[in-house]
Amino acid sequence: MSRKSKRPQTIPGSASGVAPGAGRAAAAASQPAAAFQGGPGLWGPQDAFEPKADASPVPVWLVILPILLVYFGMLHLDRYAGGFNQVVQGPYRSYQQLAGLQPKSGPEMLVAKGEAIYALMCLTCHQSTGLGSPGQYPPLAQSEWVLGSPNRLIRIPLHGLTGPIQVKGQSWNGSMPAFGTTPPLDSDENVAAVLTYIRQAWGNQAGPILPEQVKAVRAETSSRTTQWTAGELQSVPE
Amino acid sequence: MRHGPLLFLGLLGAMALSWLGMIATPQFQLGNVQPTNVPPANVLYPAPDPGLANVGREIYRANGCAYCHTEVVRQQGALVSVVISNPGTNAPATIEALRKIRGDLTAPEAERLLAATPATALTTADKSAADRAAEAMSASGAEASVRVVPTGPEIERGWGTRLSVARDYIYHAPFLLGSIRLGPDLTNVGLRQPDAIWHLVHLYDPKLKVERSIMPRYPFLFEQRPRGAQPASDALPIPGTQDVIPKPEAYALVAYLLSRRADMPLFEAPAPMVMSSGAEGGSTNAQAAATNATSAPGTNSSTETAPR
């Protein structure tokens, strides 16, 4: 019972100074009259008091508990709901994770393989940034030779390059050995893979090189044993 | 009533929050899942079930099979494995590359592994390590690819190759997920047990096929007639003095069971593909899996004798 609940009204007709026996008799005698003098109650004076809902304060713990539940619930959803993405279900946690687990399609496999071959064969000179080394090895990033004609590009790793050459407005005069007979670049797929890779790495955006193109170039230049020069390459049709 | 509107709002709010979380959000998230074309063969998945299997679904539902059997495969996690499908021609380079990614292999062991392709070179939880290993193997001249290996007790048990996802249930009307496994899960029972006669005998008396079975018998799906000098041509191979002839309901139910399969790899449920000898493991394998997927329901339902 709330401390603020009203006390029942005193029964009208009962006096405090009257002796008990007489008081009971007097009360009994006055009951029927009192019943009709009571409050709005239907069955008797005791019904005069009607309880009312009160605005008692909510206990603090009852407010903090749902807040904590909601907070930890949201932490759980952050971790396990997969961003509410339609396709993220089961043990998978995110769309990116699922996309990474898909089997790689043809062109993607080529680029991945090309990256590995570049790391194996080309990285020591042309560097992992594709910027080469000033004075020694020309850059591949944004190089017009890389982004330009496939015919000219394919010939370079097959037979090497020597003599002065202009790359991105700068002059280079070095010597690149032939790789066309060195594994893994003795295979057309691998040459195509590494050239496709350099044509789309470091901000380069050029189309892939196909193994068929490499095969055709090998066939055209099957008798060549010496390195290319820039002039010879320029005279190769695009 | 004092505070009547407040009480009403409080009650409404609690129910609304619950409805939003458990009905509305999942409907927005998953309600419009459609059949999809699965690359690279562009097979439509899932396909609607053949007619007899649809009749069988009603019989499955009517006989309360979902009270003891489930139709959902759960998956605990996923590993990735590097699979070498072709060792290539440059043996020294591939052996060296293999030994770099598997430091525990000696040269003769590596050679043996490469000779027995298709072979799993490496299984790991680290996807980028697997990618690098596959690239290294590819660079050395072998053909290697990264496959997803779902893990979990239900996968190991052979109940499925991957978890069940929302797309699997598009044509399950109503879905008969079940809730308790007094009997095995039936998501892929058409793959696990493609023999129609086995299913018919098992339905007639499960103990004939599984000695310790607690599954009740369903003899009312069958007709029993006294056996003549020879068993009838369409009687089940059950010894005894009675010929047991399946009724159309039994054939339909078995057609439904044989159509149960959910092994197509999806974007949301990567799964290993069946190995086949071929250049690019991915494309040919998916095609083989896709052909199996589209032809299986047809072939399975045609192995039964025509119902009378």
Image (cartoon, rainbow, N blue to C red):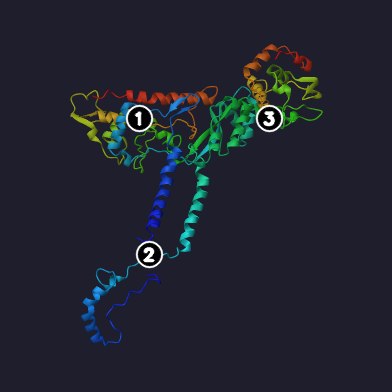
Which one is nearer the viewer's eye here, A38 or A113? A38
Tell me if residue A202 comes above or below residue A233 in the rendering.
Answer: below
Expressed as whole percent of the image width and height from the top left, the position of residue B150 reads 49, 37
Residue at x 44%, y 42% (from the top left corner): B25
Q: Can residue B207 be seen in this view?
A: no
Residue designated by label 1: B258
Residue designated by label 2: A53
**Disc 1 crowd, CA 10 A, few/some/many (<14, 14-19, 20+):** many
Tell me if residue A31 comes above or below residue A135 in the rendering.
Answer: below
State which chain disc 2 sits on: A
Whole-number angstrom distance, CA of label 3 to CA of label 2: 72 Å
Is residue B123 rendered to the left or right of residue B6?
right
Is residue B5 rendered to the left or right of residue B271?
left
**Disc 2 crowd, CA 10 A, few/some/many (<14, 14-19, 20+):** few
Question: Of callouts 3 and 2, which one flags the residue occurring earlier in the amino acid sequence?
Answer: 2
Residues at discs 1 and 2 both on one chain: no
Residue designated by label 3: A203
